[in-house]
Amino acid sequence: MEKKKGFTMIELLAVVVILGIIGTIGVVGVTKIIKSSHERHNLAQAKLFVSGAQMYFTDNKSKLPTKTFTSKEVSLRELQDKNYIEKIVDYKKDEYNAEKSYAYVTKMGTGRYAYDGELLTQDGERTKYKPQQNDNGTVIFYIGNQNFTNRTAYTNAKKEKEVSIKIKDPDTIAGYIITLYKGGKELRELEYKEVGNETQVETKIKISPKEYPDGQYKIQAKVIDIYNNQKTAKSGTLVVDTIAPLCETKVKGTSGKNDWYISDIETKAECKDMDEKGNEKNASGCVKTVYLTTTGATENVENKEVESWTVKKDGVSKLTYKVSDQAGNETVCETTEVKKDTEKPTCTSSATGPDASDLNGYTEWTNHNRDITGFCTDHISGCVVENVKKTISDSTEKTSPGKVTDQAGNETDCSDINVYVDKGNPVWKKDCANNPNCNGNGITSIHNGKWFNKRHYEASGNKGYRMGQYYDPSISGIKEIKRYRLNAEGNWEYKDSAVYPGPGVNTTFTNNYRQTNYYYEDQNNNIGYQIVNRANSTSEISSVSVMIDKVAPTLYGFYIGDNGSHGIWCNDSLSGVTRLVKYSLTPGWVTGIEIDDGTGEMVNHMEERWAATGVKNPIFACKDAAGNSSTASYPAKCTSCSDGSGKDPNWKNCHKHELGINCSSGH
């Protein structure tokens, strides 16, 4: 016997799921059928209700509306009371709410009426019925050839806007109502018209700012077909704006002083559009396009479309912006003047006062206060002051008069200028740098207080007497050494000077000393020296004794006196005679006498008798204080006797006669 197989668990589950789906579909389908049946029942009752109302108004024409597109109503209770309809019930078999169920009649034109109604159950369910419910009408608004249905248009005081309204409805247009709204509220009815049997109509509405004040307007068109189906549409927003916008010019840059800018200047016009109450949202609003006209330092433009403008040129610029709103109102902004100066002023410096410069073109020293001035130049904003001054009382360096400033606040350091002020006096170095020949007053010379003779003169190259001076140049340096001579009245007389060219302060002095030489002819006097520094300050006069005698003394007046004495006159008018000597080559003897330091006077010297035997041609020598000397030979014969008795070639005869004989040297 064959064994039979049973269902698996999976197969059983699949069967259960399928049965569930079939059951659900069945329940949903049944529910829809039931609901549809209820709706059909209610709609049939509503048609019956509207039919009863139509008979009621046909019998009671006085109750019909007299104005087109207006309605009258009648309740279910009144229709039942007047036996125009029997009791009607909903799908639950409950009576409708007779007091709150109404039927309506609307006048659609002359002799034309439309009916509809609404039943209300006790549970609040509503069932509406209208014989024709096709709402397929269209309304389009135009301004010009632009669709104005969903757009915003603007107008100002100089213009008016004409709105064209095109209406279509295939169910035949009974009429339309054009209403104007402002700010969302109904303002007025512009047009009311019964059309008749047309399916397409067009009307025009003009909005004039003279008639309608500023604000936001919309046009509503309510279209009614012959079945009392209504189509309501609103146009876009029409903004009436007769008030020009406000304009403010914004300026941005680095501010200097006195309303000047010291950087590039960014400018921009800001526009605000307000209504008469200062409310920005009800105005048309500013457009982005801004126009600019400029004059002055900046690039000149006229009515140029810009977003912003940057002033890059220095000087005074005038900018005039023009803004406008959406309605076409324009405002010319107040002209804005901007002043720009990014250049620093220039400053040249000069020094005034005594000894501002020397003949060699070097900046000179002064022993006075020195005024230096900086002269300001600025061709844009102008200098705050024309010049700045500074008084220098002590300086050995370059210095500046200070800063100059222009009206915009730009500053410039004036150029440095050499200003040397030395209020001190040069000082003699009393120790002469430890020179042993120093006279103790700042001057040194190997000949100080000593006579300088011909031999010394020739050894100096025939330049005379050499003298050295030592001085302290203080801080400014030496410009010249002045030489003076002490006159008979005891006053110093200016003779000459030695000038040292050069910048003075830049000269390097070893140990603050400098030496110079002077050369003189014969003299015996005090010579004074004075230092003059580059600031023209002087030292005291320091002197040295200058004694120069390069001329030998004079010998004359040779004579033989009584008892064989011999004599000669020796004279030196400058340094004076210091020694007189008599000698002979044979037999070789010498006699002489030292005279005290020369007086410059004549010397008449006689000494012992001279044994003439064997003595020929005696020689005389005379020396002055400077060391100059002269010699002369004693003559062998005399040309004449002192008494004038005649000539005797033998001087001995003159001696015998004891006559004074005058013989000049060399005879």
Image (cartoon, rainbow, N blue to C red):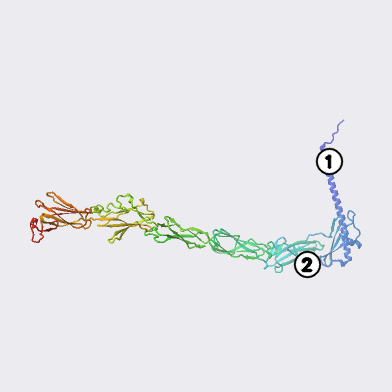
Residue 274 left/right relative to 135? left
Q: Quadrant of residue 531?
A: bottom left
**What element does badge 1 sit on?**
helix
- What percent of the width, then of the height, locates residue 223? 78, 63
Amino acid at pointer 1? Val
In the depicted structure, whether residue 110 falls above or below residue 390? below
Q: Nearer the viewer, residue 503 or 581?
A: 581
Q: How many marks?
A: 2
Indicate which disc residue 245 carries: none
Can residue 647 be seen here? yes
User: Looking at the figure, which quarter contains the C terminus?
Assistant: bottom left
The location of residue 445, given as percent across then percent down, is 29, 52
The three-letter code of the residue at mark 2 reads Tyr
601 to the left or right of 306: left
Q: Residue at x 78, y 67 (%)?
A: 193
Quadrant the N terminus occupies? top right
The numbered dot on residue 16 is: 1
Q: Residue at x 64, y 65 (%)?
A: 330
Q: Nearer the viewer, residue 430 or 238?
A: 430
- Extreme residue toward the top, this view: 1
Relative to 613, 351 lies left or right: right
For label 2, count other residues whose C-alpha is less than 10 Å away and answer few (under 14), some (14-19) or many (20+).
some
In terms of depth relative to the viewer, which is nearer, 390 or 136?
390
Residue 636 visible, this orientation? no
First of labels 1, 2 by sequence position: 1
**Element class at badge 2:** strand
- Residue 137 in percent (x, y) is at 78, 61
Q: What whole-number distance in Å separates the C-alpha atoms at marks 1 and 2?
A: 69 Å
To which residue does mark 2 refer? 192
Is 46 left, or right, of 157 in this rendering?
right
Q: Based on the displayed image, in which of its 4 quarters is residue 165 positioned? A: bottom right
